[in-house]
Image (cartoon, rainbow, N blue to C red):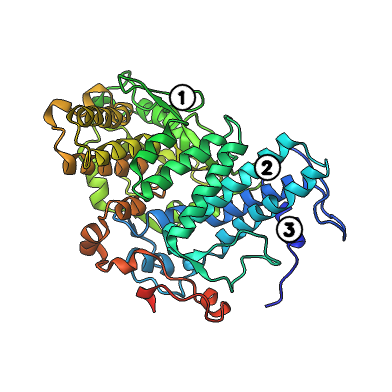
Amino acid sequence: MKRISYLLLSIAALFNISCTLLDQEPESFWGDGSYFKNEEQLRATLYGGYARMQDALGGNFLVYGDCRSDAFYEYNQTKTDIINIVRNNITPYNSYCTWAPIYKVIQQANLVIAETPPLREAGKISVSEADALMGQAFCMRAFAYFWIVRVWGAAPLVLTPSQGDDYDARMVRASETEVLGQIRHDLAQAQVLLTPSSERVYFTQGAAYAIEAQVCAWEHDWAGVIAANRHVFDRDEENRISSDRYSLAKLYTPEYTPSMNTSSAFYQYITDCEYGGIFNTGKSKESIFELSYSIEDKDSNSSLYALVAKSEAVRPRLEVKSLFSAVKASDWRFYINFYANNPRHTKYFINFVDVTRSARNVVLVRLADLILLEAEALIRLNETENDAEVRQENFEAAVALINLIRNRAGGAAYEIDIESLSVNDTDLLLSTVLNERLFELLGEGHRYFDLIRNGKVTEVMTPINGQSDLRSVVWPIYYTEVIYSKGTIEQNEYYK
């Protein structure tokens, strides 16, 4: 396969970047000598990575993280690929099985990592700016590989720029352990190079630690989850959290009582509240990293729009809506995810106001996710903890963190009564956290991975779509990627 030079890839990326990411005009031609001559070209290449990530994950975060779970069912019967994903009938010919778009993100990150040091040594870019660009690139590469390893398992580990538009297809797949090790390495690099920042649409030091917490949870490194979280938020002796840059967005307010939940004033509040703004305005104080889209710049997220708004490829399962409906008088998240009795998923189009707008930012990492991961970590640590005092502290802290999220959803009356639980109720507590994550993170690309992490996939999904073979948890590798590898990339076992 004939390959273009990676110069052309980077130039092409300039025309796909939202102006919300660019505050300067990049050069459109870099000459025939050194491909990278100045800071602006490096920065444009990095922004090209963010643009590639919009393409790779703007809607696919929901496909990979939710559509194979018990959260959604196929609604639009013309969307064959989505139907087969939901029904666990995925084949290597399903268009969503290609990892090439994510490897294009990695290509951009690799370019910045490879080309920044020579310019720094030549004095073409300051040390601080070089660190900022490389730190973001390391974090970008780590995040991209984290999606790849969770979806496909073992994968080619490409750490240098390829001479083409995507990864070198002839690379041999590295094991999941190797890929996860590289992710950890890249995040450590990013954490050193980046500085604390309140940015939401770029990778920051906070984002690097938050992603590390997610990786640690995936690997069942529960102490690591808590250690990484301490760089994002603090937890005091009363289990209250604080952070210099992140805080929970407001939802519940005593101004409205459950009996008012059907009033127009209540729905207007839901439409305009801080919590709704996480998904419909963007750059919330709760957001740690999000993909940025802009209507003004004609930069729309059409893939997400097609999934849950226009022609609706998927809707939440009736069982999920029933869980919400049972507590909707107390849990205001119902009115974020559903509009009255409408079965559609409304998180990204609250109450379906301005439904034609398809430029919502996509929040991929936020504070509530980390808080609930820490609750899960504390409960898991108690499975092997022998010190009774430590076990009690972990138990109380876990319940307090769950209640922090539930209080935001429905006030003090909606909190769990700790007196009704025991430190030994490990299974019940883990089930409580898993359910709370379903309520809090519905439609945000977490549910399927939560089921995998908790060993619940076959238990939950066999009755729904017959997924009873654990080998099917990973996705098939797209058929062209197997063919182009000329035998070095073998199809995942279940799909041979």
Camera-near label (1 vs 3) is 1
**Which of the numbered marks, if any, corresponds to residue 133?**
2
Quadrant showing the C terminus: bottom left
Q: Is residue 179 left or right of residue 15?
A: left
User: Which residue is painted at 33% across and 48% down in the image?
Assistant: 220
Q: How far from the left and from the top, in percent, is residue 241? A: 38, 24
**Which of the numbered marks, if any, corresponds to residue 12?**
3
**Residue indicated by mark 1:** 243
Q: Is residue 396 left or right of residue 275?
A: left
Mark 2 crowd level (few <14, some 14–19, many ≥20, 10 Å Cα): many
Q: How far from the left and from the top, in percent, is residue 101? A: 57, 61
Vertical side of 447 occupied by 425: above or below: above
SS at badge 3: helix
Quadrant showing the N terminus: bottom right
Q: Amino acid at mark 2?
A: Leu
Q: Which residue, as the protein is rendered here, is positioned at the far front? A: 386
Cα–Cα gap, marks 2 and 3: 19 Å
